Image (cartoon, rainbow, N blue to C red):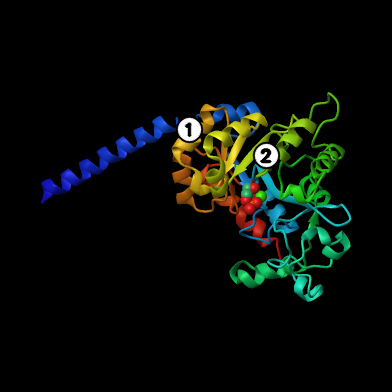
């Protein structure tokens, strides 16, 4: 009996050692460090996906302030444009999931975001849904929050005088022709992108661009080549194009890295990206066991709704104690 247990334990240890060796061959440990350093991006990277969106309504004053106070490396956001050409920070194509559009504009709940003016969008509440969906994390003040413009998110990001780093996704950019130029213009005006030969005074790249659309990244490469670009990749793209051509596209746009979904974060994928000089930021990962597994597989950072948890995983200290940050919200 004791002998059998011994054989099982020794077998498990041998399998674990062999598995670890295989993963190390497919994806060399620390191989992404060089790509992160080349793009001046922290290794490993904590990206607050739509802000600290596990704790507060996504892409709002609250989710971004929590992420900032925790000290996440980047505030992630999706940019789109209103009917009257204002760049806003909002994820979905329509307003129905997270606003009271059905109440305020009955009949328009499934209309595209670019059929609304900024004044109309400002009439909507973007936090009540969170309180209803997650009562245990609800806060009274969340029910009075609005959709933000890009400029308002930058106001939050610069409220302590520095340039809090931003990780900006051009969302469905084909619906918003010219949004790349407009975005770069705003970031130049707000000091995130240097004009002429000036240098930005920041320890790491103060802004990154990301997109599922390679055309948008190619355009951004042309107009703001100094801003690192990340090519987002989902399963449909892999099925349609295959990894070799996706990696080739990322290299053609001189991307700093790729951003595959968590289901694609296998070691042979991270290894392939690293061998091509690309870092790997995986979306959207919210559990410690998932961080551990994908980190072992070679992830260089994560988009996460729980930046406080990922920082604990990476042993990066919180800027402020997390309980205190939450206790300041009514
Ligand atoms: O931008 C990374 C990740 O956010 C992509 O997915 O749908 O949350 O924008 P999504
Ligand atoms: Ca996004």
- Quadrant for the C terminus, please: bottom right
Residue under the point 79% across and 37% down: 192
Q: CA distance from mark 2 to mark 1?
A: 21 Å
Residue under the point 48% across and 41% down: 295
Q: Position of residue 297 (x, y in %)?
A: 45, 39
Q: Could one spot residue 122 in this view of the protein?
A: no
Q: Position of residue 246 (x, y in %)?
A: 58, 37
Numbered label attached to residue 133 = none
Question: How many dots with numbers?
Answer: 2
Q: Front-most of 196 and 318?
A: 196
Looking at the rendered structure, the secondary structure element under dot 1 is helix
Cβ–Cβ below 8 Å for labels 2 and 1? no
Residue 328 left/right relative to 304? right
Mark closer to the chain start, 2 or 1: 2
Disc 1: which residue? 271
Residue sitting at the far top: 197
Nearest-to-viewer mark from 2 and 1: 2
Q: Could one spot residue 87 in this view of the protein?
A: yes
Residue under the point 85% across and 30% down: 195
Q: Position of residue 117 (x, y in %)?
A: 87, 60
Residue 29 left/right relative to 71? left
Q: Front-most of 16 and 308?
A: 16
Q: Residues within 10 Å of mark 1 (few under 14, many from 20)?
A: many
Residue under the point 68% across and 58% down: 58
Disc 2: which residue? 214
Q: Is mark 1 within 8 Å of ligand 1?
A: no
Looking at the rendered structure, the secondary structure element under dot 2 is helix
Q: Position of residue 304 (x, y in %)?
A: 59, 50
Classify 99 as above or below 213. Answer: below
Which quarter of the picture shows residue 108? bottom right
């Amino acid at each position: 009996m004791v002998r059998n247990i011994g054989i099982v334990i020794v077998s498990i240890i041998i399998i674990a050692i062999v598995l670890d060796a295989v993963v190390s061959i497919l994806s060399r440990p620390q191989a992404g460090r060089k790509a992160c350093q080349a793009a001046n991006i922290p290794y490993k990277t904590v990206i607050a996906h739509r802000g600290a969106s596990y704790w507060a309504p996504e892409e709002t004053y609250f989710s971004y302030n929590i992420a900032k106070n925790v000290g996440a490396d980047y505030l992630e956001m999706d940019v789109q444009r209103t009917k009257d050409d204002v760049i806003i920070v909002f994820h979905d194509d329509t307003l129905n999931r997270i606003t009271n559009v059905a109440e305020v504009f009955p009949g328009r709940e499934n209309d595209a975001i670019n059929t609304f003016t900024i004044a109309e969008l400002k009439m909507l509440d973007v936090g009540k849904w969170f309180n209803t969906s997650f009562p245990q994390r609800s806060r009274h003040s969340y029910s009075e929050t609005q959709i933000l413009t890009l400029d308002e998110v930058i106001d939050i990001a610069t409220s302590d005088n520095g340039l809090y780093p931003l990780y900006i996704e051009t969302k469905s950019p084909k619906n918003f022709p010219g949004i790349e130029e407009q975005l770069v213009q705003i970031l130049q005006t707000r000091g995130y992108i240097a004009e002429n030969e000036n240098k930005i005074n920041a320890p790491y790249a103060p802004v990154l661009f990301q997109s599922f659309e390679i055309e948008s990244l190619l355009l951004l490469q042309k107009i703001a080549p100094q801003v690192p670009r990340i090519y987002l990749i989902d399963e449909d793209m892999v099925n349609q194009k295959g990894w070799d051509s996706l990696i080739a596209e990322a290299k053609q746009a001189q991307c700093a890295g790729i951003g595959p979904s968590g289901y694609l974060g296998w070691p042979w994928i991270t290894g392939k990206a690293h061998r091509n000089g690309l870092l790997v930021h995986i979306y959207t990962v919210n559990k410690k066991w998932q961080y551990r597994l994908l980190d072992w597989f070679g992830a260089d950072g994560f988009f996460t709704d729980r930046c406080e948890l990922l920082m604990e995983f990476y042993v990066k200290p919180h800027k402020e104690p997390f309980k205190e940050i939450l206790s300041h919200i009514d």
